Image (tube, helix red, strand yellow):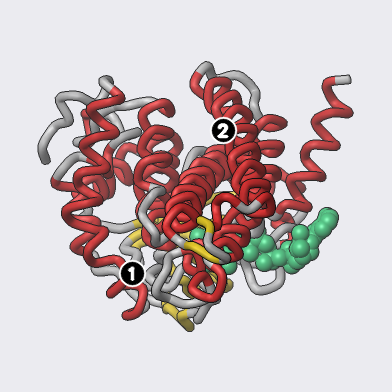
Amino acid sequence: MKALPYYHEYEAFIDSVSKLARQELIPKVTGWEHDGFFPNEVFKLLGDQGYLGLLISEKYGGVGGDYKLAGAWCETFGELASVGLTVGVNMHSLVISHALEKFGTETAKGYWLPKAVKGEALGAYAFTEPGAGSDLARIRTTATKQGSTWKINGSKTFITNGARADFILVLTKTDPNAGYQGFTTFVVDTTSKGFRVSKTLHKLGWHASDTAELSFEDVEVDDSCVLGACGDGWGQAAANLNWERLMLTLTSLAGARMCLQAATKYSGDRSAFGKKICEFPDIIGYLKEMERRILNGTALTHRALNELIKSHDCRLLVAAAKRMVCDDAVWVADKAIQIHGGYGYTTEFLPERWWRDLRLMPIGGGTSEIMTGIIRKELRRVR
Ligand SMILES: Cc1cc2nc3c(=O)[nH]c(=O)nc-3n(C[C@H](O)[C@H](O)[C@H](O)COP(=O)(O)OP(=O)(O)OC[C@H]3O[C@@H](n4cnc5c(N)ncnc54)[C@H](O)[C@@H]3O)c2cc1C
C-alpha cells in the first residue's frame, strides 16, 4: 500500500481525493447504479492508495490519521453521486475497521485489519434485526458459550455490505438478565458454517450498495472473536454509533452542497419568459434558503467534529447535527429537483438520485425521531 505523504496536509489530501473520484469513479458510478452493485475493485483501488486506512494505525498498514482527516474524506468523497457506494466504503473503513482496532483482540486485529486496509477483506456491522431497529435493546440474536466456543443464532437485516462482507461485527445478547451489560459484539468470518445471506433487499435509493438480511445458525466463534470483554457490547455500540452518525451527517452535507451547485448552475442556464430562471424571486428564495441550511448545518457539524477530535462528550451535538443536516439535505435535494422542473424528475439529471439517496439519511444510523429523543435526554442531563 502506498503511504499518504500528505495526509496531514488537508488541502492536498482533498485535492487527491477529488482527483481520484473524477478520474476513476465518476465516469462509472451511473453504470453501477443501474447494475445495482459496485465492484469490489473499488475497495482495492482505494486500498492501494491508502484511503481505507485513514483511522487505522501504521502497525496494521493504515496511515494513523485522526477524525479531522476522516471528516475531510467524508465531505470530499461524499460528493460522489452514489451515497450507497460512499457509505458502503465509509462503513467498512471508517466505522467497522476502526471499531475492530479499538475493541478487537490482537488475534482478530492481526488477521483482519491488514487485509481490510488493502481492500482485500470487507467488513459489515450488524445491529439491526427484523424486530428491532431503533429499539436495539430488543435484539434477539444470542451467543451462548459451549465449552471453549460460542454459538451465535439469530438474524440481522438492512446490513450495508452484508452480501459481500468477509467479516461482520455482530451485536448479540449474551445474558438476557443482565440489562445493558448483557450485550456482546463478535467478529464473525462469513465463511463460517451456519452463516447465510438470506436475502438482498431492493431499495428506493442506494442502488449501487448491497443491503442484506443475514442468518446465523449455530455459527461457532472462539474467544478471540469477542470485542472487548463479554458484556461490553452496548457501550461499544453507543460509541461507534456516535461516530457513524457524524460520518452520515458529513456525507449528507456533501450531498446537499452538490445539489445546491447543480441547482445554481441549472438556474443560470435555463430561461423562461425571456429571463434566466435564477432571476425569478421564487428561485432566488429557494437558492438562498438552500445555502442558509447548508451553512447552518456545516457550522453545527464541524462543531460536533471538533469536539470528537478533542475526545469531548459530543453525543448532544452529534444528535443535533444529524437531526438537522439529514432532514435539511432531503429538503435541499427536493428543491434542487423543483428548480430543474420536469428535467429534475428524470434520471438525466442528478438531483433525483441525490433525493433518493439522501432520503435514507434521516433513517439510517438512528432516525431523526431517535435523535430528538437523545437531544431531549442530553439537555435534561446538562441542565
Ligand atoms: C439501506 C439501509 C442500510 C442500513 N445499514 C445498516 C447497517 O449496516 N447495519 C445495521 O445494523 N443497520 C442498518 N440499517 C438499519 C437502520 O439503522 C434502521 O433502519 C434504523 O435504525 C431504524 O430502525 P427500523 O427500520 O427498525 O425502524 P423502527 O425502529 O421500526 O422505526 C419506525 C418509525 O418509528 C419511529 N420510532 C421508533 N421509536 C421511536 C421513539 N422512541 N420515538 C419516536 N419515534 C420512534 C422511527 O423514528 C421511525 O419513524 C440500514 C437501513 C437501511 C434502509
Q: Residue at x 45, y 37 (%)?
A: 103
Q: Secondary structure at mark 1?
A: loop
Q: Closest to the observer: 367 or 180? A: 367
Q: Quadrant of residue 42?
A: bottom left
Q: Is residue 308 left or right of residue 43?
A: right
Q: Residue furthest front?
A: 274
Q: Secondary structure at mark 2?
A: helix
Q: Report crowding for label 1: few under 14, some 14 to 19, many 20 or more residues within 10 A (C-alpha).
A: some
Which of labels 1 and 2 is toward the front?
2
118 w.r.t. 275: above or below: above
Can residue 265 be seen here? The reply is: yes
Q: Closest to the observer: 104 or 249? A: 249
According to the image, label 2 marks what residue? 298
Q: Is residue 192 left or right of residue 339?
A: left
- Check disc 1 and give the amino acid type: Arg
Q: Quadrant of the C terminus?
A: top right
Measure the alpha-carbon separation of dots 1 and 2: 33 Å
Disc number placed over residue 211 in the picture, else none: none
Q: Quadrant of residue 272?
A: bottom right
Q: Closest to the observer: 14 or 237? A: 14
325 w.r.t. 358: above or below: above
Q: Position of residue 284 (x, y in %)?
A: 62, 47
Q: Position of residue 49 (x, y in %)?
A: 16, 42
Q: Residue at x 36, y 54 (%)?
A: 80
Q: Quadrant of the N terminus?
A: top left
Ligand 1 lies in which image quarter?
A: bottom right
Q: Residue at x 50, y 41 (%)?
A: 250
According to the image, label 1 marks what residue? 164
- Check disc 2 and give the amino acid type: Thr
Q: Position of residue 229 (x, y in %)?
A: 53, 39
Q: Residue furthest left?
A: 2
Can residue 183 be seen here? The reply is: no
